[in-house]
Image (cartoon, helix red, strand yellow):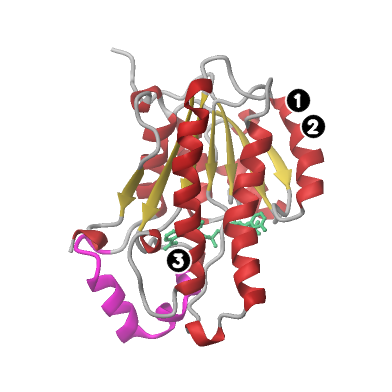
Amino acid sequence: MQNPFNLENKNIVITGASSGIGRACAIGCSQLGAKLLLIGRQEAELEKTKAMLPVPGLATILVLDLTQFEEVTTKVKAAIAGFGPIDGAIHAAGISTTLPFRNSTVEKMDHFFKVNVAAALHLTQLLIKPGSVAANGASIVFITSVMSQVGESAKVLYSMSKGALLAASRSMAIELAPKKIRVNCIAPGVVDTPMSQQAYYSQNPELKAHITGLHPLGLGVPEDVANACIYLLSDAARWVTGTQLMVDGGYTAR
Ligand SMILES: NC(=O)c1ccc[n+]([C@@H]2O[C@H](COP(=O)([O-])OP(=O)(O)OC[C@H]3O[C@@H](n4cnc5c(N)ncnc54)[C@H](OP(=O)(O)O)[C@@H]3O)[C@@H](O)[C@H]2O)c1
């Protein structure tokens, strides 16, 4: 029987591929046969990801700050011309903070919106241009967060951006369905990556234990999210669009 999660002959773009969840997605997709375009800012870390793949030769690296929109337009167009039409994308690039609402300035709101929302949507526009999408359509996956769905103190900036991404993805799913482009989100709880290791709560053992306790199954590992991405990219999810899959160890079940 054919493996329904097989990604052979699929061209997948992964942002945030230089670290954490994006890196695990690259390894998982590669193990299932995908050809990859890996995007991040740190070239050395992207090279490290590439070296971890079962077939490094099937991956291309693109060093980009996704908020440099003009450069992104030029370089992504050129990269796709060489890479071939896209079957899927995982948008894992993102930033997080723990900052009281009273300190969340308009400048910081703009910055969070630019990195976590506008950069992902701008890249998606480029990926779905006529001629850039594979004949059988494509699957776009945005990594949001449980914070798109529920609140937490000092998480206004982050929640704002992830909620916006979720809302945008639903309208995209409807607009792009006639083009056979599926659009979904994955909402992780706390996953052990450089982002969570650098978070405020990780510097205080009591706070870390409290956060861990909010997850009935404990904290996640990047592969937990990567496996969910593989499902949404694969033909097993051919009838799934406009949804958000909670991959959160039960965080939002309460
Ligand atoms: N870890 C968690 O607990 C958790 C929970 C829920 C949701 N998430 C979400 O999951 C995604 C991945 O997080 P992670 O935990 O893997 O974080 P991470 O280890 O800090 O990785 C973040 C990635 O985003 C990239 N990035 C950030 N700003 C960028 C920019 N302007 N242009 C291009 N790339 C940029 C980084 O690239 P460079 O390092 O190359 O700059 C890095 O590869 C994020 O969207 C995050 O919000 C994480």
Q: Quadrant of the N terminus?
A: top left
User: Is disc 1 placed on a helix, strand or loop?
Assistant: helix
Point out the quarter of the image occupied by ligand 1: bottom right
Crowding at dot 1, Cα within 10 Å, few <14 / some 14-19 / many 20+, comes out as: few
Residue 221 appears in the rendering:
yes
User: Magenta stretch: dominant SS?
Assistant: helix
Rendered image: mark on residue 159: 3
Q: Which residue is mark 1?
A: 81
Work out whether 151 lies above or below 64: below
Q: Quadrant of residue 203?
A: bottom left
- Asked if labels 3 and 2 touch by Cβ distance under 8 angstroms, the answer is no
Q: In front here: 212 or 125?
A: 125
Task: Say which amino acid is labelled 1.
Answer: Ala
**Magenta stretch: residue 213 in it?**
yes
Looking at the rendered image, the disc whose residue lies closer to the viewer, 1 or 3, is: 3
Query: Horizontal placement of 2 versus 19: left or right?
Result: left
Give the image location of residue 116, x and y in percent.
57, 58
Which label's residue is closer to the chain start, 1 or 3?
A: 1
Residue 24 appears in the rendering:
no
Q: Magenta residues, as a range?
A: 196-218
Give the image location of residue 118, x and y in percent.
63, 53
Q: Which residue is mark 2?
A: 78
Which label's residue is closer to the chain start, 2 or 3?
A: 2
Q: Quadrant of the C terminus?
A: bottom left
Task: Say which amino acid is labelled 3.
Answer: Ser
